[in-house]
Amino acid sequence: MLTAAQMLPLNHPASALVVGPPGSGKTLLLVHKAAQLTAKGQTVALSTFAFRGLEFLRHFAQGHYPQLTAHVATGLLKAGTVVELAQAQLATTGTVNFASNNQVREILRSLILTQGFTGTLPEAEHIIRNAKGRAKKMPENDKHYPLLTAYQAKLEEFGLLDRYDIIRKHILGMKNATVPPLQVKHILLDNLEDANEIQLIWLQIHQNQGIQLTLAANDDTTAYARDGALGPLAINQVEDWPDITRFNLPTSFRTPPALAPALGKIARQLRTRHPKAEETTSTTPATLQVENFPNPAAEHAFLATTCSQLLGQNPNHSIGIITRNDFSAALITHALRKKGLNPASFARLIWEDPTPQLMLALLYVLLNQANNAHLQLALLGFGIPAATVNEWLNTGLTAEDWLPRGCPLPPIAGLSPTIQSAAQRAKQSFSGAYQLWQAKALGPREIFKSLVAEALPNIPEADHPQALLATDMLLTLSGKLTEILPRVMIETMPNMQSPITVAPVRETRNMQFNTTIMPYAGANLWPHPPYTVLGPDADHERRLFLLAISRTAGNLILTHHTPQPTPYLAELKQALKPTPRK
């Protein structure tokens, strides 16, 4: 049953903006409206901005209104991210070659080297997304303009469109009537606060085309501010659009009353937000629990034990394990799987990053399944300069049967003693590893471990955690390595039926858990250390922390293995102190 406040935007006959705190039923309202409209034969687009967020929205919709699955089949309901919906319209007029996240990152990795960019890959991603999500072009005198233009040139060279090009191209097509708008009567969009400028323009054009909008927002939990998400400004702008009415949902049905003061305190410290009256109707008892451990292994053991105990008491108990970044989520997912648990992981595949790719390449070479790209990475992992490896490849080096042929390396005149020594070490290491394997003196996993140990000193120390996680993930693969290795890099969708979810915080939009656990909640990750080029963004970090803690409908558990916990913990504890009696 919907409340009276929810019924107002549900039955509103024109476009609506729905603003409310976490747990106020915004997503339920959108899904209910989708079911109501499609039942009447009206066409609807149900959308959000993030791919994994959309998967959760689909799962949520099917769980509450199974009949929506049939409406997808008939075309009455279109579910997709904004980019996917725009891309589908562009595809009606020609081929669209979409640049995947992997392709974009590969382009940016190459440009970081050639453009002299001094920041990290995530910083480069933020800069590009922020610039391309704006309505106006980046000024030529901006210090990041060369990176942006080089990136765009690479996309054009490969004939690719990224997510921002697709939105822009659809906007231009709608304006000049060469590409149709979405062929629906209603657009129902969640997480409006994560919209950037061109996405707002895309929405407004659809409204101008007579399509009714219902947009849900919570300005306190903007997840993509670094990428140009407007947050409170998106709400401000949409409120000024003609023929749109704002509705407020002030009541949270999720937040336990015992934790409400803590969430409120974190939110009130935000520099920019919409002041709002908030209340909770939840009666669920809850506590804030904080645990400190001597090392990550002890923290992982606690997570596994806690999950097992909670599910032992109630198999349907939902547990959310929320981390600050993808790597932490991947690390914890792997640790839980080794303990026999099977969480739904929303973490990005670690194999997209260079160091895990190197570990994978070493194993491909050892198993004699490598291509030239694998061999190139493996040799780089032994400290051989890229220019030398490229010259070898250009003068006949090939991965085909490289180990059985004795690991030959074409002669190059004038190599320095250092490079010659590195090349000799690499040749000896791979030849020795292959001989051990052929003699069956050791299994491939043990030999692989020794190869990694030899390569590790050539890898920057900051990348060692990634190398070790990738190695352990490969070592714990079940089955014959030569058969299962090709499937490693195939991304699978999270198991939405699992009672345990592990996700980086930005992927937890719309989610709710009976128990929420925040591991690695130390001062080194919450807030995230300032970027080298972009610097800190205290408001963004606070919003992400609020997004994480507001997922819980019950207990909140923070764990860490660092000496100092997150500084936000002091605010939580202060807010939960009993008020002295007068």
Image (cartoon, helix red, strand yellow):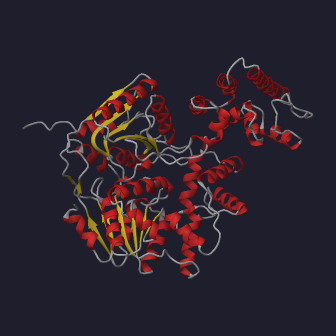
Query: Which of the pair 47/32 is nearer the observer?
Result: 32
Q: Closer to the camera, 445 or 567?
A: 445
Query: Residue 228: x and y, percent?
Result: 49, 58
In the image, residue 164 above or below residue 558: below
Q: Is residue 15 left or right of residue 297?
A: left
Q: Quadrant of the C terminus?
A: top left
Q: Is residue 274 above or below residue 462?
A: below
Looking at the image, which residue sits at the far top? 441
Residue 397's image quarter? top right
Q: Residue furthest bottom?
A: 177
Q: Is residue 221 visible?
A: yes
Counting from the top left corner in percent of width and height, residue 197 is at 48, 66
Q: Position of residue 430 (x, y in %)?
A: 77, 26
How far across and down, in percent of the image, does residue 41 sit? 37, 75
State the image quarter where residue 204 is shown. Answer: bottom left
Residue in the foreground of this view, choosing between 127 and 317:
317
Q: Residue furthest left?
A: 582
Residue appearing at x 86%, y 32% in the figure: 409
Instruction: For the N terminus, give its image quadrant.
Output: bottom left
**Residue 266 versus residue 204 in the image, above or below:** above
205 to the left or right of 124:
left
**Is residue 272 something one can see in this rendering?**
no
Number of marks in the rendered image: 0
Q: Nearer the viewer, residue 64 or 96?
A: 64
